Amino acid sequence: MQIMVCLKKILDPEVPPRDFRLKKGEMAPATEGIPLVMSSFDQNALEVGLQLREKLAGATVTAVTVGPEDSEDVLRKALAVKADRAVRVPLEQDSKLAGGIVAGLLAGAAKQLGADLVICGRQAGDWDGSQVGLILTEALGWPLVNLVMGIEPGSSGLVLRRELDEGYEVIEGNSPLVAVVTNHETNVLRIAKVKDTMAAMRKKIELFDVVDSAAVELQGGRIELVSLEIPVKEANCEMITGENGGEKADNLVKRLLELKVL
Amino acid sequence: MSLVLTCLMDQGMLSRDSLEVIGAGKSLASDLGAGLAVAVIGAETSALCAAAGEYGAGKIYSVQDASLEQYYCEGYLAALEAVCRECKPVAVLFVTNMQGRELAPRLAKRLNKAALVDCLSFNVEHETGRIIFTKPVFGGKAMAQVVLSDAPAVVALRRRSFEPAQQDQVEPEIIQVKPVSIPVNPFKVMERVEEQQAGVRLEDARVVVSGGQGLGGPENFAILEELAGLLGGAVGASRVAVDSGWVSSSKQVGQTGKIVAPDVYLAVGISGACQHLAGCSGAKVIVAINTDPEAPVFGAARLGVVGDYKDVLPPLIKKVKEII
């Protein structure tokens, strides 16, 4: 089975609000001094792919990203946790909310690879578009399983555990399919060994040229960004004090009663 | 007359999600000078049609088929595509719940249009008639205003961000839509576990007591359960607590978890990432208990206690027992 995992390099979503700024005169975040990382749900997707490969003889995991050359960092990271292959589909522009273009390029890559299973994260921690895996599903014409926590080989196909609004379900289906992954305790990305990280630096990254499908995607609807702002939030936290925990608890209950919320 | 189509995912009774999407649909239709239409899907939709009529749905597009008794993405998608081709709406609204998340982008792609997920609000620009949608980006650290290039805009609205519709009885016109074909569900459900929460549902609770990394382990959630139980509330958690396996993912509060709007939200040992605060910013009062006075959670809280929850919660429980 050819497993393709889609990865995106993004501005570290853990950066605290006080360090998050916008570029002057541009509808884009300032990137100076902020680390760039693999989007966290993509890390979950990669772990789901790696775990499935371990249970399926002959399966391979190919990490794919769409972006400029410096986005290859996320591919190196995937190679360091033992992805078999790494592919970059060049795209120079900042994808912003253009999930349709990225999805089109990824669909092209999936066809070129002959992938049976495409795994994506549910949303990227930068623009939070939450669409690439779903549009990709349509572009490939495959069935979708959304909010997947883990995938196992089944007796006749794949067994997927997916999150519901209240609870979860386990379903079985056949490849090809697209799985869009959410976080779960079982899919936190493993840590690479130092020697594997070193070895990953020397591995080959393949370039795929999939221009045609992108052109098709551009004919679809677009999301146009009109403005981007950092909301002004006035902190007005009233600190509850006290000599010890007991006094603090008493004062807290008193204030909650005064505010008529208890 | 142009129409705003709101898509309901219920069987029989209208859920809070449906009332919110109908409420938002009415408001958008009125801003655009358009009519409100509702899509209902199921094996037998007459009860749902009647219920939607009670909330002012003048035009109801109904897709009835035995295969659609239970929700599955491929089937509902085919049904909604058929409705859109019949109704030709200017906007299609969903709720960002399990169904809306997967249906909105796929439906938009089938209509060769764009979708937006997790929309917080919208307004219609007077001069141009364009609909400007607001959506949080960068985990809520920034707000983007966007327009979708051409109609229909397919949009999933964030839960608990729109007022539910009020009753407004109309005699609806019901249009039965027959999709050309409805694909069979490509997946077989082997097991479905509905997590029955003891007591109140997290999203309906008046008091939510949430725990995060600061709790240090699953066993320490017991004290949160006790406090929540006393107050008739529910327990929530941050993503770190879920990823660590301390609590089930259905308790996660935040951008990609539950969106809650209780009277009191007690954040215990939660640092307060934007992505988490996005799930509780609708609370009347956020109370933060944290050992680190610099934790970002204090920036969003109304009341703050700097201290170890192990010192504060036991006397808090004792005090609460006295007053209830």
Image (tube, helix red, strand yellow):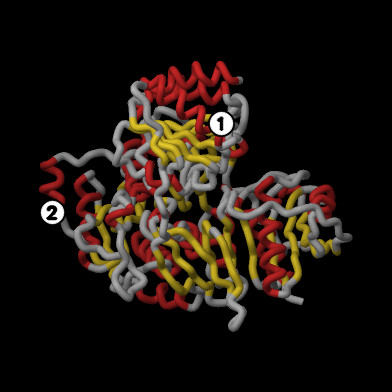
Q: Position of residue B174 (x, y in %)?
A: 84, 62
Q: Position of residue B290 (x, y in %)?
A: 35, 33
Residue, disc 1: A257
As drawn, the residue found furthest toward the bottom would be B127
What number is the disc on residue A201? 2
Horizontally, residue B138 falls left or right of residue B285, namely: left
Seen at 45% across and 76% down, the residue is: A218
Q: Position of residue B139 (x, y in %)?
A: 40, 53
Give the quarter of the image for residue A168.
Answer: top right
Q: Position of residue A178 (x, y in %)?
A: 46, 53
Nearest to the eye among marks 2 and 1: give it.
1
Amino acid beneath label 2: Met
Horizontally, residue A224 falls left or right of residue B216, namely: right
Question: Quick one: label 1, few (<14), some, or many (20+) residues within 10 Å?
Answer: few
Determine the CA span between mark 2 and mark 1. 60 Å
Q: Chain of mark 2?
A: A
